[in-house]
């Protein structure tokens, strides 16, 4: 990845909630996706995951508590933590993981 506009990259994706890997940095994948208002089901990873909202907002569900992550904010999900996205989330999301 050299020079990318993350909002533009997400806007042209054919499906919401389907990320595309833009590149790697220090061994971590840098991905982008487009959120729509639909919920995204629970998932767990064996690695930490950074979720950066570029625009819009994400309603992140951690153990039944919904945390709103606004544009310009980052949420670090620790490894082995179940997390889902509640309905009403929208915008551009950058994911940094391995």
Image (cartoon, helix red, strand yellow):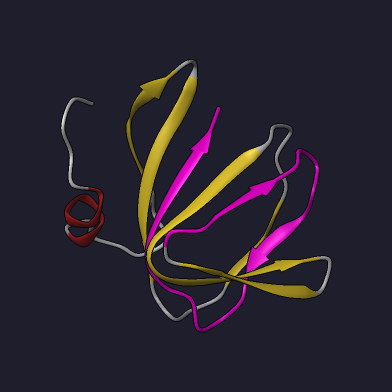
Res 37 quadrant in image: bottom left
Q: Please identify the quadrant where the N terminus is shown.
A: top left
Residue 83, position in %: x, y? 71, 59
- Whether 94 is among the magenta residues is yes
Quarter containing the C terminus:
top right
Give the left or right position of residue 11, taking residue 88 as reference: left
Q: In which quarter of the image is residue 30?
A: top left
Image location of residue 97, percent across then percent down: 55, 34
Residue positioned most to the top: 26
Nearest to the observer: residue 54 or residue 43: 54
Question: In the rendered structure, which segment of residues is drawn in magenta?
Answer: 72-98
**Residue at point 49%, 16% (across, down):** 27
The quarter holding residue 92 reads bottom left
- Residue 83 vs 58, above or below: the answer is above
Q: Residue 49 vs residue 57: left or right?
A: right
Q: Look at the picture and state if 64 lies above or below 75.
A: below
- Residue 9 drawn in magenta: no
Q: Which residue is drawn at 83% across and 66% down?
A: 63
Residue 14 in the image: state x and y as whole percent.
Answer: 23, 60
């Amino acid at each position: 990845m050299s020079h990318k506009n993350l909002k533009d990259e997400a806007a042209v994706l054919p499906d919401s909630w389907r990320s595309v890997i833009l590149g790697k940095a220090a061994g971590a994948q840098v991905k982008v996706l487009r959120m729509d208002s639909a919920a995204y089901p629970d998932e767990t990873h064996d690695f930490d995951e950074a979720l950066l909202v570029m625009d819009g907002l994400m309603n992140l569900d951690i153990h039944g508590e919904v945390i709103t992550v606004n544009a310009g904010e980052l949420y670090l999900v620790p490894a082995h933590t179940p997390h889902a996205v509640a309905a009403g989330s929208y915008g551009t999301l950058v994911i940094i993981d391995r």
